[in-house]
Image (spheres, rainbow, N blue to C red):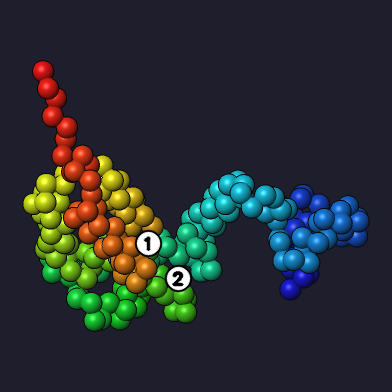
Amino acid sequence: MVSETLKRYLTSKGLKKDAEGIESLSERDIKNIESGIANYIFDCSAYSIYPRVYETIWEIDHYLLTKDPNDQSLSQRIEFSKAALNIIKNNFWVGIGTGNFEQEYQKSFKEINSLLNESNYGSAHNQYLNYLLKFGVIGFTFILFVIIFVIFNKKQSGNRLLLLLLVYMMIANFGDSNLETHVGLSFFVFFFTFLIWHSPEYLSHKPKIHS
């Protein structure tokens, strides 16, 4: 509702929630409120990082004070990770498989007494956690072994572009389950195989130093 947005906007500017406060608003402020912007901080360049940092800090503070993660991206991800870690703890070696992980997540949220609404239930946005809970430590280790074995078997340990791809995917997989989406898996498989079998010779081997 516009009235609630107005109250939050006035609060963000330190203005009283009365006629005097409303009269202090500029035309830009009024347009922001009509557009659903509840804090003047978010009225800035699309490339500004400050609003996102501010929102993240606010989310963490709200979550720590109330333990309520609902409808907050970061707080919900924390709850997803807690539920995933609980599943991993109970199925450490071999995991739970790929067919019933949604049911296990629902069970886990209740076991950890999460305040997350059932409509907001979801899986961890972390490839490592999702692989560990599905395949366990044994399966996860096997997946890593296969990737590493192919690299060394094809003598690609010095391939800088391949290593750059692996570092990129390693970091990206902390924030999402990229290898469980069609786009993410296709991207990785295409470039991994391309760089393994079609890289220029000088990328695959370290140059020899002649004395």
Label for residue 60?
A: none
Quadrant (top left, top right, bottom left, bottom right) of the N terminus: bottom right
Residue that badge 2 annotates: 115
In the rendering, at what x and y percent does residue 142 appear?
Answer: 12, 61
Residue 65 seen in the figure: no
Q: Nearer the viewer, residue 194 or 92?
A: 194
| Label 2 environment density (alpha carbons within 10 Å; few <14, some 14–19, many ≥20) | some
Q: Is residue 123 above or below residue 160?
A: below
Quadrant (top left, top right, bottom left, bottom right) of the C terminus: top left
Residue sitting at the far left: 153
Q: Secondary structure at mark 1?
A: loop
Which residue does the image show at 14% across and 65% down from the upper left?
A: 139
| Alpha carbons under labels 1 and 2: distance apart | 22 Å
Q: Is residue 94 above or below residue 27?
A: below
Q: Quadrant of residue 193?
A: bottom left
Residue that badge 1 annotates: 176
Q: Nearer the viewer, residue 96 or 202?
A: 202
Q: Amino acid at mark 1?
A: Asp
Q: Nearer the viewer, mark 1 or mark 2?
A: 1
Which residue does the image show at 87% across and 57% down from the upper left?
A: 27
Q: Amino acid at mark 2?
A: Leu
In the rendering, at what x and y percent does residue 202 appear?
Answer: 21, 39
